[in-house]
């Protein structure tokens, strides 16, 4: 019997992901991910898509996000717990797997917390490139927590935003964002309210965390020609925009069946008109049609973006020699004889399976 090849997926830890971003450079990561996500959105029909599976609890949500293009399969595990901050934990934490469809073998097990911030910002910028006025230079960011630096830098690098108007109910969060952006060349203006932050903004990013139907932006704060990048409303009962804002805007969504449940449009009737992002990117549906039009990317985060991000990580981790091989699957001499693995101590990572070990006795293991 031919010994089965060892299945040793690459494991990319949180420190490895930091090394990868440092070695490639943050701008290259953001633009590389935006390109990868854009290319996959253009292959929309190739994907087997499902709305994510969500487990809701009073404090938050845990979600599984699967997708496949027939060659690769991926899923992300991600939570959203706005009250975690008070416990010293992140609101959003994630990890994920990329696998080979032909064999089902996992190829990569990776951190996705940092990666979620990168891919969300890259997707936001990708959508804004198609929806915002090309001469947009000023962006308001409402909610200055974990995602905010990534949003700021993605819009600076990919759209040419040069001024940020910032507001958070927590002034320390805004101070952290300002400190991180010092030296980036971006001009930051700290504002006393959302309304003040939106004054003069070409683009408005809402990225707050609050498990309720909040009204961060109301229709009277809008100006003609604004683009809204609504990131924080991503769960049933968790929204950021007044319904009148949606009525006033040309609304673009990622995957409509999921967005109807989780996006800002959950507040609207089931037939409220929306346009899919893939169709805008493919030139099959209109993005911005008039200078004074208000456009809205109702982002909730779709599995395709994590699929693209995992493939990006896998490719670059292999090229840079980052990560380690993980003994996640049993090493079998005979693929039909799983029981034999109990006869010996587990082989350590990277070692070939042992030979000539005794067959286990079931009664000795019971
Ligand atoms: N659409 C997506 O793909 C996607 C991806 C990642 C995160 N998210 C969502 O983005 C949000 C932010 O995530 P995070 O990791 O930055 O969370 P975070 O907890 O680190 O930051 C959220 C910030 O929002 C502020 N905030 C809360 N209510 C506010 C209000 N009314 N006005 C102004 N600021 C307010 C908080 O003080 C905090 O600083 C979350 O709701 C998360 O679920 C969406």
Image (spheres, rainbow, N blue to C red):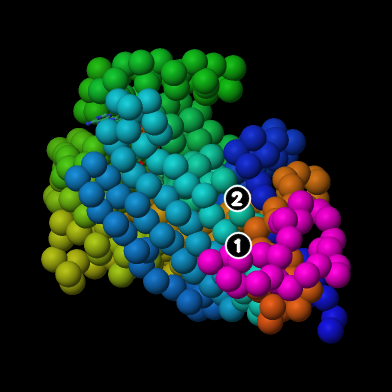
Would you say the residues marked 1 and 2 are in contact, meaning their CB atoms lie under 8 Å apart?
yes
Q: Which range is magenta?
A: 340-366
Does the magenta portion include 89? no
Q: Is mark 2 within 8 Å of ligand 1?
A: no
Q: Residue at x 27, y 45 (%)?
A: 60
Judge left or right: residue 25 versus residue 202. Answer: right
Percent position of residue 294, x then y: 29, 49
* Image mark for residue 98: 1
Does residue 45 show up?
Answer: yes
Secondary structure predominantly adopted by residues drawn in magenta: loop
Q: In this orientation, which residue lies closer to the viewer: 336 or 282?
A: 336
Does residue 131 show up?
Answer: no
- Residue 216 found in image quarter: top left
Percent position of residue 61, x then y: 30, 50
How crowded pointer 2 is (Cα within 10 Å; few <14, some 14-19, many 20+) is rated as: many
Percent position of residue 319, x then y: 80, 50
Q: In this orientation, which residue lies closer to the viewer: 86 or 201?
A: 86
* Picture quarter with ligand 1: top left
Q: In this orientation, which residue lies closer to the viewer: 216 or 102?
A: 102
Judge left or right: residue 250 versus residue 247. Answer: right
Q: Residue at x 60, y 72 (%)?
A: 362
Does the magenta portion include 355? yes
* Image mark for residue 110: 2
Element marked by disc 2: strand
**Is 122 situated above or below 55?**
above
Image quarter (top left, top right, bottom left or bottom right) of the N terminus: bottom right
Sequence-first tag of 1 and 2 = 1
Q: Is mark 1 within 8 Å of ligand 1?
A: no
Q: Residue at x 85, y 81 (%)?
A: 2
């Amino acid at each position: 019997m031919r010994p089965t090849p060892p299945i040793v997926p690459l494991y990319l830890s949180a420190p490895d992901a930091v090394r990868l971003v440092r070695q490639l450079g943050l701008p290259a990561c953001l633009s590389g991910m935006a390109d990868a996500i854009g290319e996959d959105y253009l292959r929309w029909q190739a994907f087997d898509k499902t709305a994510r599976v969500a487990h809701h609890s009073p404090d938050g949500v845990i979600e599984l996000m699967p997708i496949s293009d027939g060659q690769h399969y991926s899923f992300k595990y991600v939570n959203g717990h706005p009250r975690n901050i008070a416990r010293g934990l992140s609101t959003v934490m994630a990890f994920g797997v990329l696998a080979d469809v032909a064999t089902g073998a996992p190829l990569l097990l990776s951190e996705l917390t940092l990666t979620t911030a990168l891919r969300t910002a890259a997707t936001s910028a990708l959508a804004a490139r198609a929806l915002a006025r090309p001469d947009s230079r000023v962006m308001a960011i409402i909610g200055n927590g974990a995602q905010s630096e990534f949003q700021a830098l993605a819009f600076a690098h990919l759209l040419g935003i040069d001024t940020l108007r910032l507001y958070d109910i927590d002034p320390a969060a805004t101070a952290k964002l300002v400190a991180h952006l010092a030296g980036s060349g971006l001009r930051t203006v700290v504002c006393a309210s959302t309304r003040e932050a939106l004054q003069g903004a070409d683009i408005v990013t809402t990225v707050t965390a609050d498990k309720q139907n909040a009204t961060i932006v109301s229709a009277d704060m809008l100006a003609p020609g604004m683009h809204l990048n609504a990131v924080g409303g991503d769960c049933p009962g968790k929204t950021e925009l007044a319904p009148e804002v949606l009525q006033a805007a040309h609304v673009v969504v990622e995957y409509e069946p999921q967005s109807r449940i989780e996006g800002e449009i959950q507040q609207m009737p089931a037939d409220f008109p929306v346009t899919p992002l893939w169709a805008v990117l493919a030139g099959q549906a209109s993005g911005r049609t008039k200078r004074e039009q208000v456009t809205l990317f109702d982002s909730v985060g779709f599995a395709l973006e994590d699929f693209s991000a995992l493939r990006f990580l896998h490719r670059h981790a292999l090229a840079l020699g980052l990560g380690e091989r993980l003994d996640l699957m049993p090493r079998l001499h005979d693929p039909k004889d799983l029981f034999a693995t109990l006869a010996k101590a587990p082989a350590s990572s990277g070692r070939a399976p042992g030979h000539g070990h005794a067959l286990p006795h079931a009664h000795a293991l019971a």
